[in-house]
Amino acid sequence: MLDGFALLALLVATLRAATPLLLAGFGELVAERAGVLNLGVEGMMLVGAATGFIATAATGNPLLGLLAAALAGAAMALLFGLLTLTLRANQVACGLALTIFGIGLSALIGLPWQGTPITGLATVLWPGLDAASPLVQQFMLLDPVLWLALAAPLLVSAFLYRSRPGLVLRAVGESHDVAHALGYSVLRVRYAAVLFGGAMSGLGGAYLSLVYTPMWTENMVAGRGWIALALVVFSAWKPGWLALGALLFGFVTIAQFHAGALGLDISPHLLTMLPYLATVLVLVLISRDATRLKLNAPAALGKPFTATG
Amino acid sequence: MRLRLEARPEPSRAMLWLSPLLAALLAAAGGGVVFALLGYDPWAALGMLFLAPLSSLDGLTELGLKATPLLLCALGIAIGVRANVWNIGAEGQLTMGAIAGGGVALAFGGAGHWWVLPLMLLAGVAGGAAWGALPALLRTRFNAHEILTTLMLNYVAIQILGWLVHGPWIDPEGFNFPQTRMFEADALLPVLVEGSRLHAGFLLALLAVPLGWLLLARTVTGFRLRTVGQAPAAARYAGFSASGAVWFSLVLSGALAGLAGVSEAAGPVGQLQPSMSPGYGFAAIIVAFLGRLNPVGILFASLLMALLYLGGEQLQVSMQLPLAATGTIQGMLLFFLLATDVFIDQRLVLAEARHA
């Protein structure tokens, strides 16, 4: 049975598995609250993962790697913004293109770096703690990016609900025409939100290649970008629910590894299905009530904006 | 003075068909730039990507072979998009088609029954259709959006295949390789050109083109689908069922993708492996848009995409580039297409001053 230590290990593992989902999810939440649906999360995460890994391997500094990953994610988002915001192309199709492009590009740039060893993000050990103790080792797994991901729900809520720019962003997402009439630049707000989303996705991807694994393999994000997208819908665009959803999915991901230890003899393939099946199930549960879903969704989500007057 | 987009009085028909050509050229140029940036000779890479595969009969039959699953999947996706139903799950539906058809081959193949191959094809169609029906049910009954459900079901289908070929269906004499035994001759699609891999599935895919065109352009069902997609309010007023359109397009595109899957299994692959498709189901989305959601256009677009796949394999062999490098060009192709598509409905004009 699980003792206290195993429970702690499970919690730490869950937090680590949830971190990429939290980062990418909150990026996408902000973009969607501004009225932009970017289905390219998976592609942005992969490019972030590859870029972050390469920058770390080349410079030996994982912090530079994280920075590079955030910039790369934002660059991908900029591409998306140019197409959907400036040129007003279809957001669904552009997001898919971004993902397909990102899968290919990351594989291409990451190829020479497959199998390269890196020193991942080190956790600063507090003086006086014994690095050999298993308990301390568990806490050492809690790195700065993870703390950032855990802070994201609070920071994003404070921004959305307690700050003026957050209010403007929500206004743009609910009714771009009204926001425009009030004198706010809809495009500028949307660009900022989309770029933020890209940077967060890039960080989420880099967490996988720098901390979680840590190595680069082709297509290593393995659908987490899509799960992050589904989580945003699941949360009904509410930060609290998004955080909960990400933790839940982190747990499901970890549970599949621990099933064997708990005496369950199930094929790893069937267990790998769990997060995806759970996503479908959750979508069904929250979408059942069409009116509620409609009331919660940003009213201008996915609609291109044309300035008139 | 700056450039500004302005709505055209009428959509440009010339631009509608020029846009894919422009996009293909731009994607090739963009690919060249990426190759050059990564230190490869761009001319050699582009030549290998676009020209080398077309220089032999072998290359041409391979082109038809690769175009087959792309064409089948893209036709279904296009019919869906016409009705504003987004099937991102062709990859999973293809996989389920391969599983269902492959199951028949493993169970009944080898005894020389004439009905094995037809039954495989039927099973493949049914497997894909069932995997399409599931998101249709979730959408119409529970309002869960098909973009996410079809996508998630891709991963589920691939894991089911992985489980089967690692476990219950593994070849007992296969040295524990995760694959089934090779299908017997009576469970394989006949080859069309002696010495090549081009199989009868290509003919089925070609047959689907006029059928798809008839459906969309000449039947009431097609009209209903397009109305539901373009003018939902008008469709409601006319009594056209939106759920009906969801069911029809997801089941049909699932069936076509399933046929693509069983054709791969009973064609070039000849067995079940952990992955039955190098992303055909996703590339087919690009094919559908590149072909203007028009079955005839999709035929040409699928040949272009097949060329990209073939060229990508050449690059992999001769320049050690990953197969996913084709994805870079595929993605750019769709980007440029969406960008040039903007100019179907709009045009650039010089604006003297801008008042915001």
Image (cartoon, rainbow, N blue to C red):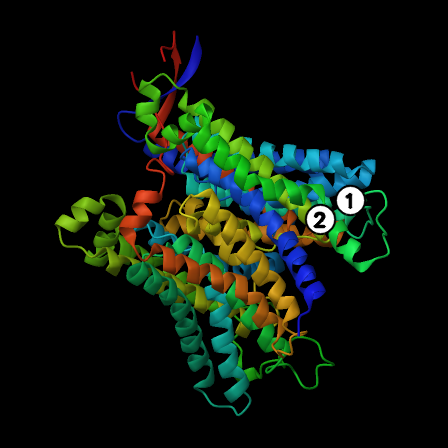
Same subunit: marks 2 and 1 = yes
Disc 2 vs disc 1: Cβ atoms closer than 8 Å? yes
- Report the residue marked by disc 2: A142
Residue A81, given in percent of the width and then of the height, sits at: 49, 31
Residue found 52% across the figure and 84% down from its top: B186
Q: Chain of mark 2?
A: A
Which quadrant is home to the C terminus of chain A?
top left
On the picture, is B68 further left or further right than B249?
Answer: right
Q: A248 or B333, which lies in front? A: A248
Which quadrant is home to the N terminus of chain A?
bottom right
- Report the residue marked by disc 1: A123
Separation of residues labelled 2 and 1 (CA atoms):
7 Å
Q: A101 or A258, which lies in front? A: A258
Q: Is residue A259 visible?
A: yes
| Local SS, label 1 | loop
Q: Quadrant of residue B344?
A: top left
